[in-house]
Image (cartoon, rainbow, N blue to C red):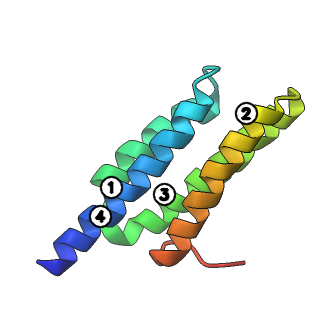
């Protein structure tokens, strides 16, 4: 039973963080926003052992989103997005989904 709860927690938290990043991406309908919607569905439906790849792709999408904000001169958007990406990275490391670099 503990494994099921842990899997549900990891999937739920990953999904929530991706959703927050998706909210930050909704200002424009970009490829990044569409990718994040797909990644959220994957976080909720994929087996635990594949969530590392989902987290890594979400981090890459978040990085791209931050660069888009910077290229538009949107410092506030960048700050908001970078904060979410930071929390996503920390969660991924703590959950064993991604490794510290």
Q: Is residue 11 rendered to the left or right of residue 64?
A: left
Look at discs 4 and 3 and give the one toward the viewer.
Answer: 4
Give how far apart the Cα atoms at labels 4 and 2 are.
28 Å
Residue designated by label 4: 9
Look at the image and tell me in which quarter the C terminus lies: bottom right
Residue at 58%, 54% in the rendered image: 57
Label 3 residue SS: helix
Residue designated by label 1: 12
Give how far apart the Cα atoms at labels 1 and 2 are.
25 Å
Residue designated by label 3: 54
Residue at 36%, 43% in the rendered image: 41
Q: Are marks 1 and 2 in contact (CB under 8 Å)?
A: no
Residue density around tag 3, few if under 14, some if 14–19, many if 20 or more, within 10 Å: many
From what the image shows, is residue 67 above or below residue 9?
above
Q: Are marks 2 and 3 in contact (CB under 8 Å)?
A: no
Q: Are marks 1 and 4 in contact (CB under 8 Å)?
A: yes
Look at the image and tell me in which quarter the N terminus lies: bottom left
């Amino acid at each position: 039973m503990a494994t099921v709860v842990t899997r549900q927690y990891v999937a739920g938290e990953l999904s929530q963080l991706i959703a927050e990043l998706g909210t930050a991406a909704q200002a424009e309908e970009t490829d990044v926003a569409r990718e994040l919607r797909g990644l959220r569905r994957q976080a909720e439906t994929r087996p635990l052992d594949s969530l590392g790849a989902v987290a890594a792709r979400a981090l890459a999408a978040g990085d791209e989103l931050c660069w888009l904000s910077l290229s538009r001169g949107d410092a506030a958007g960048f700050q908001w997005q970078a904060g979410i990406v930071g929390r996503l990275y920390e969660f991924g490391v703590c959950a064993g989904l991604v490794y510290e670099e």
